[in-house]
Amino acid sequence: MIKLRWLFVFMLMTILFNNKAMAQWTPQPSGLPTGISVFSFHPVDPNTIWAIGLSYSRPSQGFLKSVDGGKTWRVRTIPNASGLWFGSIFARDSSTAWISTVDFNCTLIANILKTSDGGNTWVKQTTAFPASGGCPNWVYFFDANNGVSMGDPTNGYFEIYTTTNSGDNWTRVSKDQTSTQLTLTSIKLIKAL
């Protein structure tokens, strides 16, 4: 009987604790424009958030940026990105960000674009995904200089590029350092590094 009483007390405490923890969450309006869904975002401080938004009626040719913690968003387009889909965004601060882009079929154009002026201008990082058929899925930076980007396989192995100078030059990881059997778990591990 004593064990049952302690089990009941434990369950009651768990319920009360969980309700108290859940009570700390309050719904917030997203501030996103109607018809836009965010599928990749990167906050850099409590106020600045970079994101890629998707309108299901057309490719994601732009990005979103909030400077008030997500209360309001400004939708911005990237010149010369017509017909491209954006895979991911990674931001270092309120001025610097990278976006991975590709044409819808991963057959023609694959890019990593970088901005250093808050998104006003974007520059193609020419040494990443130079061959047709590249399909960069994401880009990630460990610090201001060292980054990695991974894409679908071309020429028999996954395209993984690294940079040590903020993306000015990218080097493809050689075939003997990758595997055609790269699993989703391995990709997540690489991204986490």
Image (spheres, rainbow, N blue to C red):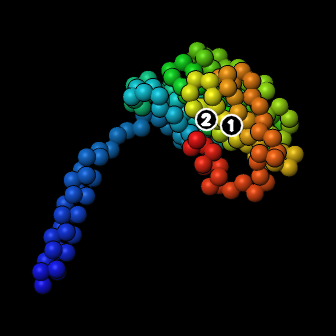
Who's the residue at 27% across and 53% down the image? 22
Asked whether residue 103 is in view, the answer is no
Who's the residue at 19% across and 69% down the image? 10
First of labels 2, 1 by sequence position: 2
Above or below for 97 versus 35: above
Disc 1 residue type (three-letter):
Ser
The answer to whether 84 appears left or right of 133 in the picture is left
Where is mark 2, residue-wise?
Answer: 140
Q: Do the residues labelled 2 and 1 touch (CB within 8 Å)?
A: yes
Query: x, y (%) of residue 76?
Result: 58, 24
Q: Is mark 1 on a helix, strand or loop?
A: strand
- For the N terminus, the quadrant is bottom left
Asked whether residue 50 is in view, the answer is yes
How many numbered marks does the figure carry? 2
Who's the residue at 67% across and 22% down the image? 165
Where is mark 1, residue-wise?
Answer: 149
Above or below for 145 versus 109: above
Residue 173 occupies which quadrant of the picture? top right
Residue 97 occupies which quadrant of the picture? top right
Residue at the extreme front? 176
Query: x, y (%) of residue 123?
Result: 70, 20
Above or below for 11 versus 81: below
